[in-house]
């Protein structure tokens, strides 16, 4: 907790009534949970809030109260922007629209480039929702069951059910506090983490069929053809990366996902002791030491060649250190 930053945020909020709240492109549970959680809390405090996710919201988060408030485009009137879970302003997908409006940047990525007027960046937090849950009262905002449920969804999804290496006793204490609003935690697990569409599982199958391995590195690709064949309509990997990173003896896993508009999205996962965030950042992306991503404006084969070559260097360098 940072008292100085909290006072600045509280003061900035007191100066404005019209707020644009925005999360990152291809939003995950932390982005959506934080967006709804903070958005509802600001509304309860009497603010006019526009909650924006340029890529909308996946159906598995539509159990959250308030999800219908999420829009894909910005409104006209806002005096303040709060960017959530975005390590750089491009991640919002709204860089131009935001222009030179003041920004409060709330994030937990080590690769955050501090683009805001106020930057609450805590890379020790397991989720951006954890930062929000911990600090809402210090920003003069109150919690209720809907807000707590959204924030707990953010924490549970980003930690894959409290099992990533950045989970601390603080994470669990905050989760317990959120649960005490009367939340059914198994409902969150089922909706946000466990339930899968048949199309998503077939899509996993397409990726698993093409699994490659060199030493302790595994990778696969998901093509537009795989999407078509299986009927999966997301632009993401349907969390297949979590299956890859659970393979015994594997230190780094990668998925290459062909994008409908051209280009390839790359996702990395690494075991403790390996850092994929810096490599992702060198390619214009970002993330955490253990989980990172980047977008490439090239063809799949070329991206695979470059990324596998550079990722292998991390494994080789770590071996010698
Ligand atoms: P995922 O691989 O699940 O998309 O993302 C893993 C982590 O890396 C998440 O924390 C996500 O926010 C971050 N990340 C993924 N893609 C990008 C990107 O293109 N740019 C940045 N800055 N971060 C990314
Ligand atoms: Mn996050």
Image (spheres, rainbow, N blue to C red):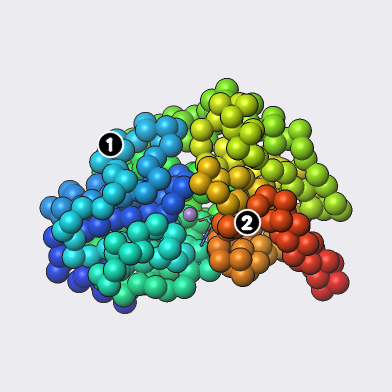
What residue is disc 1 on? 68
What residue is disc 2 on? 298
Residue drawn at x 44%, y 33% is 60
The CA distance from mark 1 to mark 2 is 35 Å
Percent position of residue 130, x then y: 42, 55
Residue drawn at x 44%, y 51% is 25
Residue drawn at x 59%, y 29% is 228
* Residue 62 visible (yes or no): yes
Q: Quadrant of the C terminus?
A: bottom right
**Secondary structure found at label 1:** helix
Q: Nearer the viewer, mark 1 or mark 2?
A: 2
Pointer 1: residues within 10 angstroms few (<14), some, or many (20+)? few
Residue 251, quarter of the rendered image: bottom right
In the displayed structure image, the side of residue 89 where residue 45 appears, left or right: left
Pointer 2: residues within 10 angstroms few (<14), some, or many (20+)? few
Closer to the camera in the image, 10 or 80 = 80
Q: Quadrant of the N terminus?
A: bottom left
- Number of labels in the image equals 2
């Amino acid at each position: 907790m940072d008292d100085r930053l909290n006072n600045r945020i509280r003061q900035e909020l007191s100066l404005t009534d019209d707020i644009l709240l925005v999360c990152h492109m291809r939003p995950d549970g932390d982005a959506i949970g934080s967006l709804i959680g903070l958005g509802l809390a600001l509304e309860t405090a009497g603010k006019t809030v526009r909650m924006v996710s340029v890529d909308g919201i996946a159906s598995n988060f539509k159990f959250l109260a308030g999800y219908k408030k999420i829009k894909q485009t910005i409104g006209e009137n806002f005096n303040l922007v709060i960017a959530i879970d975005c390590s750089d302003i491009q991640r919002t997908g709204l860089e131009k629209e935001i222009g030179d409006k003041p920004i409060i940047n709330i994030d937990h990525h080590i690769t955050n480039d501090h683009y805001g007027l106020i930057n609450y960046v805590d890379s020790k937090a397991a989720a951006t929702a954890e930062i929000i849950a911990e600090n809402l009262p210090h920003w003069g905002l109150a919690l209720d069951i809907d807000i707590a449920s959204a924030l707990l969804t953010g924490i549970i999804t980003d930690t894959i059910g409290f099992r990533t290496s950045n989970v601390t006793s603080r994470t669990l204490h905050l989760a317990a506090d959120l649960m005490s609003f009367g939340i059914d935690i198994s409902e969150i697990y089922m909706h946000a983490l466990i339930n899968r569409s048949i199309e998503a599982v077939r899509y996993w199958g397409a990726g698993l069929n093409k699994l490659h391995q060199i030493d302790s590195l595994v990778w696969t690709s998901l093509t537009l053809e795989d999407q078509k064949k299986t009927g999966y309509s997301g632009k993401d990997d349907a969390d297949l990366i979590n299956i890859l990173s659970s393979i015994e003896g594997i230190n780094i896993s990668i998925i290459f996902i062909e994008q409908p508009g051209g280009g390839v999205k790359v996702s990395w996962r690494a075991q403790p002791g390996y850092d994929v965030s810096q490599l992702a950042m060198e390619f214009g992306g970002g993330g955490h030491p253990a989980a990172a991503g980047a977008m490439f404006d090239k063809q799949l084969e070329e991206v695979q060649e470059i990324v596998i070559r550079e990722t292998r260097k991390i494994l080789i360098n770590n071996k010698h250190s």
